Each structure stands twice: as structure tokens, then as C-alpha cells.
Image (tube, rainbow, N blue to C red):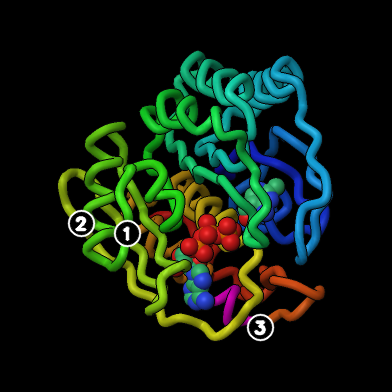
């Protein structure tokens, strides 16, 4: 069985963070492992507290995983501080980890900040160069590129700039666009759109975590990047369409929509 590691924060309400990653990886047919960067006290309405792990404890978790069950892919989510970011980059370089998906998490769907301001520069310098693909939403792509995005041309321009600065593929997600939920992949000098009808729901808590974990799972199973993004896009669209409605705010998705195991299939 192929394996994937999520390095991310815990969401006590189960919709985002490590919990979304483990559910997504399991439904996408890989064995899911985790290294926690932080605990959050969080629900569908907001984040009330954050407790970071120490860099040493994060390193211990990553080492424990790599020295026993080497992951075929790694997804990186919420990492709040420069010290933790440096620890991750150093360990991933030491293990020559492959298939690294970086979700540059900056805020929760509810708006709460999940990265310290000064850590954004460290994330750019340390993690983006290691990424097979980085998956910013529109506000994150604006921060990473330094460009304002007004429309789909703006998404392409920002993705090109990030890709050229940090030598990685970029998937600029269109969940925050006013139009359809179209995501733009820029890889090897080519732009490709992954289109998605906007689903009328406010229950989008954890969509970014889910998409990045689904991409990592498909890379772990041997699919190429474009196929992995397409399969992840299909997965998120189906999970959103399953219309779960929990909590008082922006609710989580239902991952148990695919009991046929269609999404768990491996590459031929
Ligand atoms: N209402 C929607 N209908 C269909 N697809 C959506 C919708 N909202 C988001 N998506 C899709 O979900 C994925 C995640 O995109 P989004 O831009 O919401 O990420 P994010 O802001 O990082 O998520 P998060 O809410 O976890 O922070 C993308 O593929 C996006 O197109
Ligand atoms: C722990 C955690 N990671 C990521 C997100 C982004 O949705 C969140 N809300 N919580």
C-alpha cells in the first residue's frame, strides 16, 4: 500500500487540518500518517486557541515516520512559525523526500490567522523550493506573488511569478473567485485550467486541506501531477456536493460519499 504523511495542525472540529487530511488520504486509498505542528481549539465558527508543538517534538515525529514507514508523498499544511518551517525543510531535505505538496495555509475559512507574519518569508524561502506543487488560494497567491488578483488573467500572472521565483509548480485555487471554482495549474511553463461549477454551499471548511491531501495521495499512488490535480478536483467537487450541513458556521465536508472506492484506485 502506498503511504502519505501530513505535516499540519489539528482542527478539533474535524473539518480541516490533520483530521481532513487523514480522512482524505484514507478515502483516496493511501495509508495516512501525521506529524502535528500545532493543536487548535476550533469549530465551524472560528479558532479560539492555538498551541504550537516545539521544533524538537516536530522533528521527533517526522523522524519516527521516515525511519520506519517512508511516505510516498508529503502534504504540508498549517505551520505557524519560522522555527517549525525550518525544521520541516531541514528534515525533508535530509530524507530527500519526494512528492511534496505545500498548502501555504495563512488563515482559516472563518478568517482566523494561522501563520505569524514574519514566518511568511521563511515559508517562501524554505518550503516553496522543495514543493512539487504549491496550492495557494487567491489571497495567498497575492501575498506570495506580491500582485493583486482581479480575474482569471491575474491568477495566471501570479502563478507564473510564484513558479519562476521559487521553481515549483503552482495551483492557484479559485474557491474565493466570484465566478466558478476554476483552479489554474502552472507547471513547466504551461498554464492549464481545471474547471469546476461553483456549488451553492457555505459549508467549505477545510476545502484547501482536502484538495492538497487528495493531490498528495494521487502523487503517492503514481499518478502524474496533472492527473493528480484532476482527480483531486473531482474528489473535492463530489465531497462538496454531498451536502453535509453540520455546525453553526462554515461546516465540514462529507468524505464518506465514495463507498464504491472509485477514488481509492491506484495508477495503472
Ligand atoms: N463553492 C464551491 N464549489 C465548488 N468548488 C469549490 C467551492 N469552494 C471551493 N471550491 C474548490 O475547493 C478547492 C479549495 O479551494 P479554496 O480556494 O476554497 O481553498 P482554501 O481557501 O485554501 O480553503 P480553506 O477554506 O480550507 O482555507 C478548490 O479546488 C476550489 O475550486
Ligand atoms: C488546523 C487547520 N489547518 C488549516 C486550516 C485551513 O482551513 C484550518 N482551518 N485549521
Quarter of the image that includes the N terminus: top right
Q: Quadrant of residue 83?
A: top right
Q: Position of residue 82 (x, y in %)?
A: 58, 23
Report, in whole angstroms, how far the alpha carbon at label 3 lies from the one at label 2: 31 Å
**Horizontal side, residue 197 vs residue 259: left or right:** left
Above or below residue 239? Residue 103 is above
Q: Nearer the viewer, mark 2 or mark 1?
A: 1
**Dot 3: few (<14), some (14–19), or many (≥20) neighbours within 10 Å?**
some
Determine whether the residue tagged by mark 1 lies in a helix, strand or loop: loop
Q: Please give the name of the residue rendered at 55% of the width and 29% of the height, measured from the top-left corner.
A: 119
State yes or no: discs 3 and 2 in contact (Cβ < 8 Å).
no
The residue tagged with tag 2: helix, strand or loop?
Answer: strand
Looking at the rendering, the stretch of residues picked out in magenta corresponds to 237-242
CB of mark 2 within 8 Å of CB of mark 1? no
Circle 3 sits in a helix, a strand or a loop, which is it? loop
Residue that mark 3 sits on:
243
Prevailing SS of the magenta stretch: helix
> Where is residue 258 shown, x and y percent of the image?
62, 74
Q: Position of residue 105 (x, y in %)?
A: 56, 46
Residue 149 numbered mark, or none:
1
Front position among marks 3 and 1: 1
Amino acid at each position: 500500500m502506498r503511504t502519505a504523511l501530513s505535516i499540519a495542525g489539528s482542527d478539533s472540529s474535524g473539518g480541516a487540518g490533520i483530521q481532513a487530511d487523514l480522512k482524505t488520504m484514507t478515502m483516496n486509498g493511501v495509508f495516512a500518517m501525521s506529524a502535528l505542528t500545532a493543536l487548535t481549539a476550533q469549530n465551524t465558527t472560528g479558532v479560539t486557541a492555538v498551541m504550537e508543538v516545539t521544533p524538537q517534538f516536530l522533528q521527533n515525529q517526522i523522524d519516527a515516520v521516515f525511519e520506519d514507514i517512508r511516505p510516498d508523498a508529503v502534504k504540508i499544511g498549517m505551520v505557524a512559525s519560522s522555527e517549525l518551517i525550518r525544521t520541516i525543510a531541514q528534515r525533508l531535505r535530509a530524507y530527500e523526500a519526494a512528492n511534496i505538496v505545500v498548502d501555504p495555509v495563512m488563515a482559516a475559512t472563518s478568517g482566523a490567522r494561522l501563520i505569524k507574519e514574519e514566518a511568511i518569508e521563511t515559508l517562501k524561502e524554505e518550503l516553496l523550493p522543495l514543493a512539487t506543487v504549491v496550492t495557494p488560494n487567491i489571497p495567498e497567491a497575492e501575498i506570495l506573488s506580491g500582485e493583486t488578483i482581479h480575474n482569471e488573467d491575474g491568477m495566471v500572472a501570479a502563478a507564473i511569478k510564484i513558479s519562476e521565483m521559487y521553481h515549483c509548480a503552482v495551483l492557484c485555487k479559485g474557491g474565493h473567485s466570484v465566478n466558478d471554482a476554476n483552479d489554474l495549474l502552472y507547471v513547466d511553463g504551461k498554464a492549464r485550467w481545471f474547471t469546476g461549477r461553483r456549488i451553492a454551499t457555505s459549508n467549505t471548511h477545510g476545502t484547501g486541506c482536502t484538495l492538497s491531501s487528495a493531490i498528495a495521495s494521487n502523487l503517492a499512488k503514481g499518478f502524474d501531477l496533472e492527473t493528480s490535480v484532476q482527480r483531486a478536483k473531482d474528489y473535492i467537487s463530489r465531497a462538496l456536493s454531498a451536502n453535509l450541513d453540520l455546525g453553526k458556521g462554515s461546516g465540514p465536508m462529507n468524505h464518506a460519499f465514495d463507498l464504491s472506492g472509485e477514488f481509492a484506485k491506484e495508477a495503472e
